[in-house]
Image (tube, helix red, strand yellow):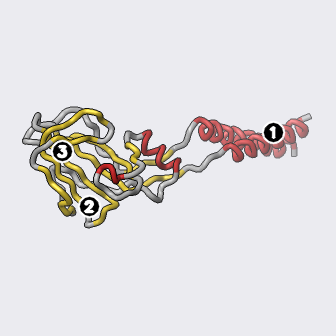
Amino acid sequence: MLRKSAKFVTIFSLLILLIAKVNMSDVYALSVPEFPSCTNPTGTNLRVQYDDGVHGLVGSTAEYRGKDSVYNINGNSDQILQCLCTDKGEGIQTNWWKVSSLNNSEIQTLRDQGWHYIASGALWGLDSAPYMAYNSRYTCNGEVQGVGGPEVLGLAATGDKIQLYSMIGIITGVSFLLLGFLMLRAKK
C-alpha cells in the first residue's frame, strides 16, 4: 500500500511541475538608465531653454508658467532631462527616455511604475520616436517641493498571478516529489 501511495505522490508531483512550467511566463529585469537631478544636471548639454512662457507637462492637461530647460544627457538624444521651474516655485523634472527597442511588456511595466508612454516625441520637440517620460518633484527657487517620490532607476518585472500560482505549484510539486521518494526509501 505504501508503494502505491509513493507512486501516486510522485506522478502527482510531476504533473504539478509540468503544469507550473507551462504556466510560467518570463521573469525579466528592466534596466532604466540613470538621470541626473535638475538641481545639479551634470553630464548634460543644454538643448533649449526658455526663461519664461507657458509650458506643458506630459501626463497633465494644466498649463505651467515659468522657466523650462531641456538637456541632452551625455550628448545623446536617447535620454532627455526637462527641468521646469514654475512661477509658483514648483519644480518638476521630466526624464525622457527613447524606447524604440522596448517591447509591449516592458513598456507596460514602466507604465505600471508611473511612466507615460509617448508614441512620438516629435510633438514635444524631440525625435520622431517612442519615448517614456517620468515626472518627479525637485527643489526649485530654494524651496523643497511636495510629494513626488524617489526617481526610479531600475525596475524588476516580477510577474503576475499566473507566475505566483506557478511558483506555488513548483514548490508543492517538489515537496510531493521528495515525500514520494522518502516514502519509497522508508519501504525498503
Q: Nearer the viewer, residue 40 or 15?
A: 40
Instruction: Find disc 1 in the rendering and name its residue.
Output: 12
Query: Which mark sits nearer the N-terminus, 1 or 3?
Result: 1
In space, the residues marked 3 and 2 are separated at their CA atoms by 16 Å
Q: Is residue 45 visible?
A: yes
Instruction: Please tell me how crowded label 1 is: few (under 14), some (14-19), or many (20+) other residues with Cα within 10 Å.
Output: some
Instruction: Please tell me how crowded label 2 is: few (under 14), some (14-19), or many (20+) other residues with Cα within 10 Å.
Output: many
- Amino acid type indicated by mark 1: Phe
Instruction: Find disc 2 in the rendering and name its residue.
Output: 73
Residue 7 x, y percent position in the rendering = 87, 41
Q: Secondary structure at mark 2?
A: strand
Q: Is residue 20 above or below residue 101?
A: above
Query: Which mark sits nearer the N-terminus, 1 or 2?
Result: 1
- Amino acid type indicated by mark 2: Ile
Q: Is residue 24 above or below residue 89?
A: below
Q: Is residue 30 left or right of residue 79?
A: right
Residue 137 x, y percent position in the rendering = 22, 40
